[in-house]
Amino acid sequence: MTNRSMSEIVRRQKPLTMRPEATVREACREMDTRRFGAVLVTDEKGRLLGIFTGRDAVRCLAKRRDPAAMALHEVMTRDPQTLPPGSTAIEALRLMQDGGFRHMPVVQDGVVVGIVSRGDFRGLELDRLDEETGMWERI
């Protein structure tokens, strides 16, 4: 059974990153254009400050805030869980399942190197997670 590392998955990736001052509207436009489910919010040195996902956009709209006037730092999820590039696919899947989120930033020495989402994983990796989950539910 294969268990790829995060390095293999993010090797050719160009993650969508934006500064915390960018607006929710700008982020949503880029997410739509690039068909990405998340924006990694970084400082000028590429250090991760937070993550902005569709769920955060919904929160902005639910508060009846103007997406063109609301900055990402106001609504992003701060200090999200991350994984180093050497982590395995099953480690990422476990963390995402346990935390109830679909996107996991990959960070090395504090700097963003990529992002993985549940959709990046193959059938065997997902099957293994389902198998482990079933085993824990029986215990």
Image: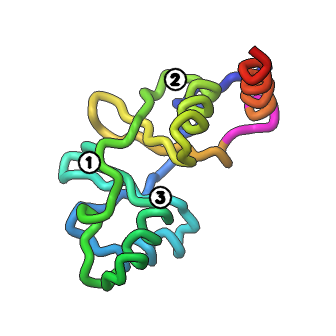
Tell me where the magenta segment starts and ends, as one range: 121-125
Instruction: From the viewer's side, name the closer residue of 112 and 12.
Output: 112
Which quadrant of the structure image shows residue 69?
A: bottom left
Q: Earlier in the sequence, mark 3 or mark 2?
A: 3
Residue 99 is inside the magenta segment: no
The N terminus sits in image quarter: top right
In the image: residue 21, left or right of residue 79: left
Crowding near the residue tagged with mark 3, few <14, some 14–19, many ≥20 C-alpha atoms within 10 Å: many
Q: Amino acid at mark 2?
A: Ser
Mark 1 against mark 2, which lies toward the viewer? 1
The spot of residue 112 in percent (x, y) is: 35, 41
Label ID, residue 38: 3
In the picture of the structure, the residue carrying the numbered disc 2 is: 87
Label ID, residue 49: 1
> What is the secondary structure assignment of the residue under circle 1?
strand
The spot of residue 36 in percent (x, y) is: 54, 62
Q: Amino acid at mark 1?
A: Leu
Label ID, residue 19: none
The C terminus sits in image quarter: top right
Q: Earlier in the sequence, mark 1 or mark 2?
A: 1
Colour approach in the figure: rainbow
In the image: residue 12, left or right of residue 47: right
Q: Is residue 70 visible?
A: yes
Name the magenta segment's main secondary structure.
Answer: helix
Which quadrant of the structure image shows residue 20?
A: bottom left
Seen from this angle, which residue lies furthest front? 139
